[in-house]
Image (cartoon, rainbow, N blue to C red):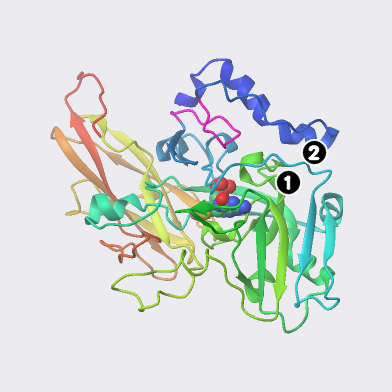
Amino acid sequence: MPHESVPARRSLLKLLAAAPAASALGGLATAAPATAATAATVPGIVKPTPPELFTIRGTNAESRFDAFRSTGLLTPTDRFFVRNHTSTPVLDAATWRLTLWGDGLHGRGPVHLTYGQLRDLPSVTRTALVECAGNGRSLYATQQGETVSGTAWTLGAVGAARWRGARLSDVLRRAGIAADAVDVQPRGLDDEYVTGGVNLGRVRRPLPVAKALDDVILAYEMNGEPLPYDHGYPVRVVVPSWVGIASVKWLGDIEVSTTPLSSPWSTDHYRLFGAAHPPGGSAPITRQTLKSGYELPFGTTLEAGRVHRLTGRAWSALAPVRGVEVSTDGGALWRPARLLDAPRRDGWVRWTVPWRPRRTGPATLLSRTTDAAGNIQPERAVHNTQGYLFNAVVRHPVVVVRDGEPPRTFV
Ligand SMILES: Nc1nc2c(c(=O)[nH]1)N[C@H]1C(S)=C(S)[C@@H](COP(=O)(O)O)O[C@H]1N2
Ligand SMILES: [Mo]
């Protein structure tokens, strides 16, 4: 467990990163923690992102999938991926307001809610994964030889947390949502996003009323603590089973509309474009897909002649996981892995399989999820130009070495 071997400096950073808790309870000043001078930070991300837990990709921090090995069903904040279009704003719950507005409200005028008023509404607690639509994107290139644009995630743009908050449906009803409202559009308080010289405005994406009234949460707690700054403090949207972009962080306002809404995040991005898709692109993507992965670094070494207890995770946004099969010989022979958790919706299951490699040299480990709706990870994912929804079986390279050879990592 590499994260536990790093000495005291980390505990100090953890304390600093826990600042939202103090500010929510005691009204302390909410200045950004003074971690900028340490190596383990990324500009724009407040919490430490040490290399044993994260891979930095621009303004984003990808979780190392092998760092999930020592965790349970929930992903601790210290290793939960961060996807920021710009940078984490350090907001103050005491002055925060949520504004609901638009022609889809009875009263027409805007409605405001304070943090206290939101917390006074009945709360719900549920586990849900947040997973970027582009999780696994780099595998389109490395595994399928296809060109895609966007952040080159491997498998670590996903995490599971226990979210507590108010139901979006309660908030919408309280604000007076009209019967003929069709879309709502949450928007973040982070900076406007400028890309290729074009200002796309603040991060926002329409959500159909049917989903908004179903199981969406306005979350103020993550794993029993106030939301960390990087994950949306003081309030974020959590849209279970949908692509991560729907779960808007640092929520500031929600437009409620009787006509369909759009944003660059539902028109130019987060649709499927390419030869296999309709000419103008698919409808905006909604649900995530299914995946699985080994909790090992790519290219890691394993000793020949001894039994390795390989572990991994499997998840599906479409139905509970039914089973996981693995192959340790590049896909010729498959056998079932043992599931360590009862499959449930919106979570992942841990699995394990023993492997005693005999021959030294490169080997390819594969894993394949099947879910209760009969979905199964295909051999190839259907290409789309922006590399969304990668669902294919991942070919995980390892190197088997002779007993006693010093461990090395081949990338
Ligand atoms: N306001 C705001 N919300 C946002 C984003 C953002 O940059 N700004 N990124 C989105 C994307 S693309 C993803 S995948 C998830 C990531 O959530 P996390 O950083 O808490 O893991 O947040 C979403 N919500
Ligand atoms: Mo994302």
**The magenta segment:** 40-52
CB atoms at circles 1 and 2 under 8 Å apart? yes
184 falls in the magenta region: no
| Mark with earlier residue (1, 2) | 2
Q: Name the residue under label 2.
A: 24
48 falls in the magenta region: yes
Whether residue 342 can be seen here: no
Q: Rounded to the nearest whole Å, what is the CA distance between mark 1 and mark 2?
A: 8 Å
Q: Which amino acid does label 2 sit on?
A: Ala
Left-right relation of 26 to 346? right
Q: In which quarter of the image is the N terminus?
A: top left
Q: Which of 288 and 69 is in front in this view?
A: 288
Q: Which residue is drawn at 13% across and 35% down?
A: 359
Q: Is residue 309 above or below residue 383?
A: above
Can you give x and y, in whole percent of width and height, for residue 267 in the image?
Answer: 49, 70
Q: Mark 1 points at which residue?
A: 234
Can you give x and y, in whole percent of width and height, for residue 387 in the image?
Answer: 36, 59
Q: Which residue is drawn at 50% across and 18% down?
A: 6
Can you give x and y, in whole percent of width and height, for residue 100 in the image?
Answer: 77, 65
Q: In which quarter of the image is the C terminus?
A: top left
Q: Which residue is drawn at 68% across and 31% down?
A: 32
Q: Is the magenta stretch mostly helix, strand or loop?
A: loop
